[in-house]
Image (cartoon, helix red, strand yellow):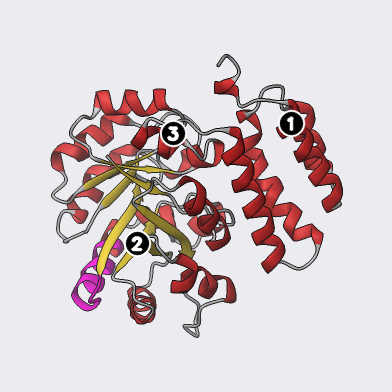
């Protein structure tokens, strides 16, 4: 099984990816959170840092572009090629309302004819491999049959399917019936993405889709950074490795961010996913959320690691 790390805006930037790569790397591709082309064609400071080769050393990293303008996509792709990237991912999956109302991300799926013209221009003019991350529709999964007809016209490197519609955001269950149809009808390689949070989830998926050899993990790797290693090598994450990962990530944010507030914001965002991996985590999670000084945060984290165990290790 090939495993990919999904791009999660604001979370899986290069500081996170480097720390994860050092301690938990069992991932074949890391997708970089989306670049949103602007009118002047410049990369933002965040975007540039994220795609610098030295910030992605040793890993197969794939930049992602969020746009509904073929011209912007092509211009940005050419810029990324100068940094050495030969694969670019198109974001047709972001469900955020601020993105969707502009007809980008999964909002673009509501305009199939425009999407077809976009892809026709991009594949004709961009000299780079293009993968696509998509949902199965904006308002209804019935939209996907037409979308798949469009995707089948183009040599997409990989079609990464999150089988929810935009309006689901992350609610409801991924639609495996639609994904099953995609597996049968897609002329391009298919990758699955959606709600794999544990080995049990992974095994259920493998049992249902033995023909699929590529899975993208996202929130599951924030909740359990060792999940990819458990899938690939059968090795569960231990508390010591998780602590080293945490400390490297924390140090990394201190190196690049100024002031305690943005550092704490980043760490609190992670703990929103990670805290339930520990036994009796609730009171610690509340204290982390309320912490306003680094030393207070550090004391709470020290206590959590010393006083509690990882949930799956409590009976070992």
Q: Nearer the observer, disc 2 or disc 1? A: 1
Please provide the residue range marked out in magenta. Answer: 115-128
Q: Is residue 136 among what the camera can see?
A: no
Q: Which numbered circle lies on residue 306?
A: 1
Q: Nearer the observer, disc 1 or disc 3? A: 1
Nearer-N-terminus badge (2/1): 2
Q: Residue at x 72, y 22 (%)?
A: 280
Q: Is residue 60 left or right of residue 47?
A: left
Say which element carries label 1.
Answer: helix
CA gap, disc 2 to disc 3? 21 Å
- Residue 194 percent location from the top left of the image: 40, 37
Q: Nearer the viewer, residue 72 or 285?
A: 285
Place residue 238 in its image quadrant: top right
Q: Which residue is mark 3?
A: 195
Say which element carries label 3.
Answer: loop
The quadrant of the rendering that contains the C terminus is top right
Q: Residue at x 27, y 64 (%)?
A: 130
Say which element carries label 2.
Answer: strand
- Residue 266 percent location from the top left of the image: 68, 53
Determine crowd level at label 3: few under 14, some 14-19, many 20+ residues with C-alpha closer than 10 A. some
Nearer-N-terminus badge (1/3): 3
CA gap, disc 2 to disc 1? 41 Å
Q: Residue furthest bottom?
A: 40
- Residue 279 percent location from the top left of the image: 67, 22
Prevalent SS, magenta region = helix
Q: Which residue is mark 2?
A: 89
């Amino acid at each position: 099984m090939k495993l990919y790390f999904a791009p999660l805006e604001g979370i899986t930037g290069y500081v996170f990816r480097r720390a994860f790569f050092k301690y938990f790397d069992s991932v074949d591709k890391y997708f970089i959170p989306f670049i949103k082309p602007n009118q002047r064609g410049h990369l933002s400071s965040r975007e540039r840092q994220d795609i610098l080769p030295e910030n992605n050393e040793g890993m197969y990293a794939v930049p992602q572009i969020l746009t509904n303008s073929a011209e912007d996509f092509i211009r940005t792709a050419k810029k990324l090629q100068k940094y050495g990237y030969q694969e670019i991912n198109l974001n047709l999956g972001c469900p955020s309302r601020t993105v969707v109302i502009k007809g980008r991300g999964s909002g673009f799926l509501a305009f199939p004819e425009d999407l077809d013209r976009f892809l026709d221009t991009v594949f004709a003019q961009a000299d780079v491999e293009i993968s696509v991350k998509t949902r199965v529709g904006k308002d209804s999964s019935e939209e996907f049959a037409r979308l798949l007809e469009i995707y089948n016209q183009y040599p997409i490197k990989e079609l990464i399917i999150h089988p929810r519609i935009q309006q689901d955001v992350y609610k409801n269950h991924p639609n495996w019936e639609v994904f099953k149809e995609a597996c049968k009808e897609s002329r391009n390689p298919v990758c699955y993405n959606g709600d794999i949070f544990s080995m049990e989830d992974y095994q259920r998926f493998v049992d249902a889709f033995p023909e699929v050899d590529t899975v993208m993990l996202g929130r599951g790797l924030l909740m359990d950074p060792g999940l990819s290693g458990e899938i690939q090598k059968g090795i569960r994450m231990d508390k010591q490795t998780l602590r080293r990962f945490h400390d490297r990530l924390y140090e990394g944010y201190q190196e690049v961010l100024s002031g305690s507030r943005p550092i704490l914001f980043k760490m609190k965002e992670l703990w929103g996913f990670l805290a339930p991996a520990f036994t009796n985590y609730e009171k610690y999670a509340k204290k982390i959320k309320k912490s306003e000084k680094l030393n207070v945060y550090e004391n709470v984290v020290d206590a959590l690691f010393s006083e509690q165990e990882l949930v799956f290790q409590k009976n070992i």
